[in-house]
Image: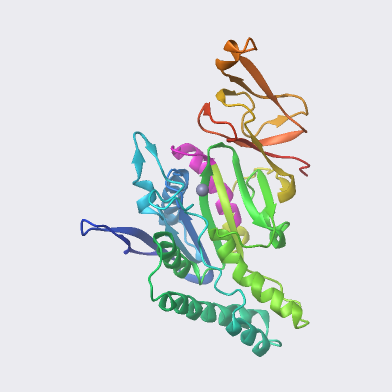
Amino acid sequence: MNTFNKYKIPVQGLPSGDDLYIRVIDVEGPEKGPKCYIQASMHGAEHQGNAVLYQLLNYLESNDIKGSIRIIPTANPLAINTKMGPYTFGRFNAGTGDNWNRSYYNFTENNEKVHLFAKQHLNSSESIINVEYKKLMEDLLVDQITESKYGSSQNGHLHLILQQLAINADYVLDLHTAGVATRYLYAPEYLAERSSALPFPFHLIIGDKFGGSMDEAAFITWVNLRNIFSDLGRVFNIDFESYTLELGGEERISIEEASKDLEYILKYLSHKGLTRNSETKSEYKIIKCNKKDYKSYFAKQAGLYDFIAKPGQLIKKGDLLAIGINFENYFLEESIKYEVLANEDCIVLTHYPSSSVMQGTEIYQVMEQFY
Ligand SMILES: [Zn+2]
């Protein structure tokens, strides 16, 4: 049987003297195998991942795995607890304005110890490198913590703890949601094909670059090593994988929809040898698109918006995306109503969650030139 080890780690001291904690659940299978790390709710209003982790725990109670899974629900207790009326002000640190998913550490970039490691392991097997490099990364993260003798920011402090918890993983899944959204994921360029093992319907292929998010922080360490090896004339295939999963809209959970989300994740875990092949005979259709064809529509006019095009829908060029109304137009002897039309054929991934729209608000995110 699987063994379950649960513990809490303090991540945020409060002026009242209290601490906020994250909860860690380590599930270890009876047989050795790969390690997977899954966290949810780094952005505090993005709850669905927790419903999926609840379903995953239920599954793990009665299904043995080969390897281990580290589960961290509500990975950002400060963000989920920051409420404004009924809404969760969870995307940004309310004190500093910093996005909670943009200040993870790229601690292997231009690091002399990583260069030295690559030279020492120029002829080592990939399996030895995978083991030894994780040890080095663990040390480098400790360096990162002790180096900051002036302390670290709230976001940085939490991120370092989570990066430490994820450092030994072979696979990292960061569970998010978007405004009002369908299911989709972000995969780095080097996983453009392998991402199909995680059969969410829409995949955005981003560059192998670091922009501060958890998935990028996790894979960039391996990309940095691969690039150094490449300069030294060695081809190194990265075994490690990390993805950000977008599980529908924010501010809600659906236990029922979580079953489908879990089905995709279990499909992936069985592909990696962690779980047994599921019985489902589902056919999965996956549509992918490159970062450059992932487009945002920004509101040219402020007003109240009726979002006609729904997440997951295919919209033809010239078709209606949204209708806006603004009564100032009436006083200008113009039509109160105006339309936002699609510039190109596209699939809608997300739209803004509120009908009250400022000029310049990102109202739609769509895939163009999908394949
Ligand atoms: Zn998010």
Left or right: 113, with 27 as reference point: right
Q: Which of these two is toward me, 301 or 162?
A: 301
Magenta span includes 277 = no
> Residue 328: where, in percent of width, then height?
56, 16
Q: Quadrant of residue 172?
A: bottom right
Report whether 345 appears left or right of 250. right
Question: Residue 175 placed where, x, y %?
Answer: 51, 51
As drawn, the residue found furthest toward the left would be: 16
Up/down of 41 relative to 207, above or below: above
Count of numbered tags: 0
- Residue 1 seen in this snapshot: no
What residue do we see at 61% from left, 81% from top?
A: 114
- What secondary structure do most residues of the magenta stretch adopt? helix
Range shown magenta: 248-268
Instruction: Quarter of the image for the N terminus: give it.
Output: bottom left
Residue 170 appears in the rendering: yes
Q: Quadrant of residue 85?
A: top left
Residue at 74% x, 45% y: name it. 293
- Taking the image as shown, residue 149 lies to the left or right of residue 360, namely left
Task: Name the residue rendered at 67%, 79% in the picture.
Answer: 126
